[in-house]
Image (spheres, grey):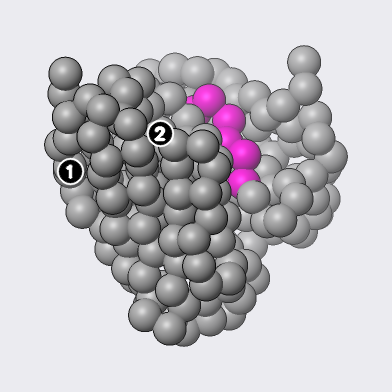
Amino acid sequence: GQNIDQPTEMTATEGAIVQINCTYQTSGFNGLFWYQQHAGEAPTFLSYNVLDGLEEKGRFSSFLSRSKGYSYRLLKELQMKDSASYLCAGMNNNAGNMLTFGGGTRLMVKP
Amino acid sequence: DAGITQSPRYKITETGRQVTLMCHQTWSHSYMFWYRQDLGHGLRLIYYSAAADITDKGEVPDGYVVSRSKTENFPLTLESATRSQTSVYFCASMGAEETQYFGPGTRLLVL
């Protein structure tokens, strides 16, 4: 299987930039997903990286390095509504392309 | 309405009782999943289904039973509920590019 590691909590200020890191074991790796989950709600899809590099979409970016087993989610111009948990999930082609989720990073945005 | 729904949204039961959680999706997605989410463990896969009448165990299947007689429905049954099964249960289905879309969740309390 895969181990997915990400920090438990992060705090940042409104308007700032924050980077949420995720590391994973590379065995059978076939893609990296990021989900956002607000308290009491379901996870919602943010991004999917399968190739190395940075993908940008508005205030948000997601980066992947397959050789290093490393990904990050970058949030710019933070807004209060960005306060949520961010879940990193690795897809494993040795396990029928099932997802293994990290424990999530709870981001708190302060005024 | 299109999408993925779960019922009930909240359930309180007693130890030893049988409980069935329902999941319904209108996208005709082949793959469906059941996860549980607990503090300190993140999302863990209980069972998944690749198509009608095809199901397989995930990471934490003990104490659970699933069936999939129709593509759109994927019920999860706790045959004899235990307190350790108190959790939030999420159903998901897989769309394009292996992206999973989650239902709103069922909050289950076993007394």
Report the magenta residues as a range: B100-105
In the picture, the disc for residue A22 is none
> A60 or B40: which is nearer to us?
A60
Q: Chain of mark 1?
A: A
**Quadrant of the rendering where the N terminus of chain A is positioned:** bottom left
Place of residue B103 in the rendered image (x, y in percent of width and height, measured from the top left) = 58, 30
Q: Is residue A106 visible?
A: yes
Vertical arrangement, residue A48 with respect to residue A57, above or below = below
B69 sits to left or right of B49: right
Place of residue A100 in the rendered image (x, y in percent of width and height, measured from the top left) = 45, 61
Q: Mark 2 to mark 1: distance in Å?
A: 14 Å
A42 sits to left or right of B82: right
Vertical arrangement, residue A29 with respect to residue B17, above or below = below
Say which residue appears at 47% left-offset and 30% top-offset.
Answer: A42
In the picture, the disc for residue A37 is 2
Kindly identify which residue carries mark 1.
A9
> B14 or A59: which is nearer to us?
A59
Of labels 2 and 1, earlier in sequence is: 1
